[in-house]
């Protein structure tokens, strides 16, 4: 389970019970106490919950009203940076592109900051903060806020994303298995499918830890993509059903 997924589940659990101990949260999330304490510390710094002795509590209405979401610095692995840099090399000056609400898309921001004006359509609020003000034309889709990763998604997100013709669409996946990119959410599936349908070129950004995993919802057959950009080895990709006819752009992290 990714950190953003854990954050979402922690918020959901606290929404039901208001307070939970570290032990109870660990039992629900199947994580170690040290991992959970790091998550709670991060969420507390970002203003999503109140850290208490031995656990965490949901914010009161008054606290929610005064909450400020801070842009926390993110650390990317060498593999993530290599994948993002290679993906950015396919962005041309003046392109209209779609970028999803994933860490790999966010990592791409550092490699496209100085491009001539791009039109970037995204549901990733963090991406807006990561790009220089005024240099790019950024269109943020509307939708229901996912506080765990500062993204938005609902039917209105899909409607806006479907209104553009993209030179390229860039997105990640929760898993790559059986020749399919997969997601944990039907809403995410609908959004990425719509963006890929509107794009001349579509690129799947996938770290090797996702190869061979099958999340609950199928998004797109790999054969429908322009390329998969990954640090995974060919044998692992073949076992995950990535056809030899699909362009695989290998990087080293």
Image (cartoon, rainbow, N blue to C red):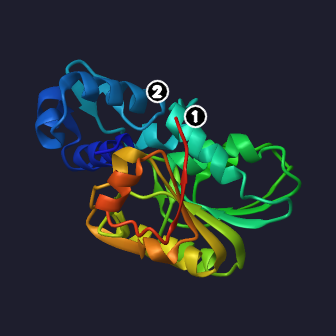
Separation (CA) of disc 1 from disc 2 = 8 Å
Question: Which residue appears at 43% of the width and 74% of the height?
Answer: 220
Judged left or right of residue 24, residue 250 is: right
**Residue 88 higher or lower than 44, as above or below:** below
CB within 8 Å, label 1 to label 2: yes
Work out whether residue 126 can be spotted: no
The percent position of residue 103, horizontal first and vertical second, equals: 51, 45
Judged left or right of residue 71, residue 7 is: left
The percent position of residue 140, horizontal first and vertical second, equals: 66, 62
Q: Residues within 10 Å of mark 1 (few under 14, many from 20)?
A: few
Work out whether residue 98 can be spotted: yes
Question: Which residue appears at 71% of the width and 58% of the height?
Answer: 90
* Residue highlighted by disc 2: 45
Q: Residues within 10 Å of mark 2 (few under 14, many from 20)?
A: some
Question: Which residue appears at 33% of the width and 67% of the height?
Answer: 241
Residue 194 position by quadrant: bottom right
Q: Earlier in the sequence, mark 1 or mark 2?
A: 2
Judged left or right of residue 187, residue 132 is: right
Q: Secondary structure at mark 2?
A: helix
* Residue highlighted by disc 1: 70
Residue lying furthest right in this view? 116
Of 84 and 6, which appears nearest the observer? 84
The percent position of residue 250, horizontal first and vertical second, equals: 53, 49
Question: Which residue appears at 52% of the width and 35% of the height?
Answer: 253
Q: Secondary structure at mark 1?
A: loop
């Amino acid at each position: 389970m990714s950190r953003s997924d854990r954050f979402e589940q922690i918020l959901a659990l606290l929404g039901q019970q208001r307070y939970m101990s570290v032990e109870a949260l660990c039992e629900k999330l199947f994580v170690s106490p040290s991992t959970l304490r790091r998550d709670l510390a991060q969420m507390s710094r970002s203003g999503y919950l109140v850290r208490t002795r031995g656990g965490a509590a949901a914010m009161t209405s008054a606290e929610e009203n005064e909450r400020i979401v801070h842009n926390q610095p993110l650390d990317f692995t060498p593999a993530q940076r290599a994948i993002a840099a290679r993906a950015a090399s396919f962005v041309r000056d003046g392109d209209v592109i779609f970028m999803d609400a994933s860490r790999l898309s966010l990592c791409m921001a550092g490699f496209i900051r100085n491009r001539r004006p791009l039109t970037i359509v995204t549901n990733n609020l963090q991406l807006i903060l990561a790009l220089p003000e005024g240099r790019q034309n950024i269109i943020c889709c509307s939708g229901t806020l996912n506080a765990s990763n500062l993204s938005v998604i609902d039917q209105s997100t899909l409607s806006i994303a479907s209104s553009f013709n993209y030179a390229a669409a860039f997105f990640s996946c929760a898993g790559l298995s059986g020749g399919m990119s997969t997601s944990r959410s039907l809403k995410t599936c609908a959004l990425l499918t719509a963006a890929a349908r509107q794009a001349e070129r579509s690129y799947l950004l996938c770290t090797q830890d996702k190869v061979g995993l099958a999340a609950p919802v199928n998004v797109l057959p790999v054969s429908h993509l322009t390329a998969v950009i990954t640090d995974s080895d060919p044998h692992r990709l073949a076992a995950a059903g990535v056809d030899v006819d699909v362009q695989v752009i290998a990087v080293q992290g």
